Amino acid sequence: MSSTRAAPPSGAIISVLAAAGITVSLMQTLMVPLIATLPTLLHTTTANSFWAITATLLAGAVAMPVSGRLGDLYGKRRVMVVSALLLAVGSLVCAPANSLAPMVAGRTLQGLGMGVIPLGIAIMRDVLPPQRLGSAIGLMSSSLGVGGALGLPAAALVAQYVSWHALFWGAAGLGLLMSFLILLIVPESPVKSPGRFDFVGAAGLAAGLVLLLLPISKGSDWGWTSGTTLGMFAASAVILLLWGWWELRRPAPLIDLRTSVRRQVLMTNLASIVIGFAMYAMSLITPQLLQLPAATGYGLGRSMVEAGLWMAPAGLMMMAISPVAARLSGARGPKTSLLLGTVIIAAGYLLALALMGEAWGVLVFSAVVSAGIGFAYAAMPSIIMSAVPLTETAAANGLNSLMRSIGTSCASAVLGAVLANLTIKLGPVTLPSEAGFRAGFIIGGGVALVAALIVLTIPGRRAAARPVSSGEPAESGREVPTH
């Protein structure tokens, strides 16, 4: 049994969990080099081909809170291994695919693996010594950005020089390797929640989220005022209201809404939505700016591989900043780190307005924005976990990760609409204009400042990463003892 074997070194546990997070986040950029050629590769229309992207988004949004609750109930390591195996199976389904249906099915399974990151953070909180916890959580949180940044050039290189099928064979191998390493190195958390899994609550949340995120993702194609878009938004509102009514009456709910509406948790989750928006703004705008033809007068004319390499340092910046954020959180509290992160993000977007004309300038401002995101992402789990019972940490982290995903989905919709409406003609081709990019940077900086205002409403200067007991969450504004 994992509870009786010798405890592995903390460094090994942190390394495996962070590597698992990076592996999962790679799935988000795996398809980026293929977007333009997906209709040809899958023998389908351009509109239908985007389901290969959307399926992962929807599945991941549902998986994060659900897998978090399953981990609290049945063992976080166990559910983490299942999540990694789902990623591997999904990749195996995609690898030989040459049509849309198996690709969407496989990408859905890959999305179900997104629960690895909140589960990993919760395991760290349960098994690591206090002196290693802050930097470990920061590293795990930053894995989302690190994997995305490193995955883009790696996927472009493999797709260009080997085969696009090799991307998925490689992803399958990584998923299987991570499953094995988690079983071998990571101990099972000793903390579990009593109760049974809320299947009705999971189904209600899944339906509500799909009906919310799908029109956000596809609204520009369907029309924001179309019957389909408005009908899905209305259905989502009704289902989520009914879901909330159900959850409040359950003795063991999927998500404890009474805990979630505590000011410390609620405002941190609201900040997560806005910071997720600010993060994705850079991810959406920067590759296009780097790859647009120099003939536009503002495009930088780089290939997909070159663009990925110019962006990769930004992801590494998130990893480098995590121990700095941990030290700041330890000295001044994670709220300070979160606030500093939002200000740095806003400053990065301000720099973008001045530096967007050169590739080195793109590297500089994207690194600054990523540094801010690193500070913010390292702080949010600590604030959340200081305000929830010990037995609800995975579910609470899953909900926080979901909030970030909602932010990225909103950014995709808003900035996609901005870039689609502010365009120029280059020969027969319609391209985003310089004004569109500048508007996107201004929006990214503006929402970062909104996030800063939200952070100021979070109570307490300091927050610990471990509450005192499963029934008594930590009070805002004071440190609590660790176990």
Image (cartoon, rainbow, N blue to C red):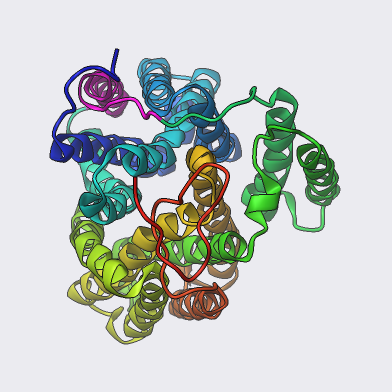
Query: Which of 166 and 121 lies nearest the eye of the viewer?
Result: 121
Query: In the image, is residue 146 above or below residue 30?
Result: below
Relative placement, left or right, of 230 versus 350 is right
- 170 part of magenta stretch: yes
Which image quarter holds the N terminus?
top left
Q: Residue at x 64, y 60 (%)?
A: 262
Residue 20 falls in which quadrant of the image?
top left
**Horizontal and vertical percent position of residue 81:** 37, 22
**Horizontal and vertical percent position of residue 292:** 34, 64
Q: Residue at x 72, y 32 (%)?
A: 201
Q: Is residue 302 visible?
A: no
Residue 300 falls in which quadrant of the image?
bottom left
Query: In the image, is residue 217 above or below residue 34?
Result: below
Query: Which of 241 and 233 lies nearest the eye of the viewer?
Result: 241
Query: In the image, is residue 60 above or below residue 318?
Result: above
What stretch of residues is rendered in magenta?
Answer: 163-190
- 27 part of magenta stretch: no
Q: Residue at x 35, y 48 (%)?
A: 144
Which image quarter holds the C terminus?
top left
What is the magenta segment's predominant secondary structure? helix
Query: Which of 256 and 15 lies nearest the eye of the viewer?
Result: 256
Relative placement, left or right, of 116 versus 186 is right
